Amino acid sequence: MPYVTFHKDLTRVKTKLAFNLTKRQLICFGAGLLIGVPAYFLCRGALGNEGAVVVMMILMLPAFITALYERDGMPLEKILKHVLTARVRLRQRPYKTENIYEYLQGRTDAIERGGKARGYQAGGAGVKNGSTGAKEKR
């Protein structure tokens, strides 16, 4: 009895249009050809055939890499976008956390002294009144 193999993970299956290439790959290869072929004809007179071919390959290479490279299901342009946003993003955090351990340390110090935890805000804010939040030396 003949068997047919198929992908078990159907999310990785891509629709092929022509020449067993996806639409994205066809667009990238077409863009590479539109850049490389005119560059070859323009450089052929000045550089000769070998030099013009090298220039054409260098100009077409980014489009071909963009068409073929894929990692973890993401194409190259998405990966580059994520890398650039991670590098360019502001280093300042958009939120501020409360240090509950500093609040608990202040409560523990006050209990060890035998009194109430005076000087701390009610509601567990964790910062002494008039303090910057840094632990003070005694």
Image (cartoon, helix red, strand yellow):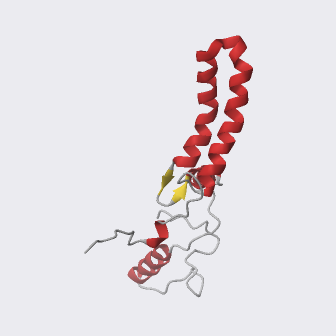
Residue 119 horizontal/vertical position (percent): 57, 79
Q: Is residue 2 left or right of residue 43?
A: left
- Indicate the quadrant containing the N terminus: top left, top right, bottom left or bottom right: bottom left
Does residue 91 appear in the picture of this structure? Answer: no
Residue at horizontal 41 percent and vertical 71 percent from the top: 9
Residue 104's quadrant in the figure?
bottom left
Question: 26 or 74, which is in the foreground?
Answer: 26
Residue at horizontal 71 percent and vertical 26 percent from the top: 39
Residue 113 horizontal/vertical position (percent): 41, 80
Q: Is residue 115 above or below residue 97?
A: below
Q: Is residue 83 above or below residue 110?
A: above
Question: 116 or 85, which is in the foreground?
Answer: 85
Instruction: Please identify the residue farthest to the left as the structure is shown.
Output: 1
Q: Is residue 2 above or below residue 22?
A: below
Residue at horizontal 69 percent and vertical 42 percent from the top: 31
Q: Is residue 69 left or right of residue 90?
A: left
Q: Is residue 123 above or below residue 42?
A: below
Residue at horizontal 73 percent and vertical 29 percent from the top: 38
Question: 14 or 133, which is in the foreground?
Answer: 14
Question: 37 or 106, which is in the foreground?
Answer: 37
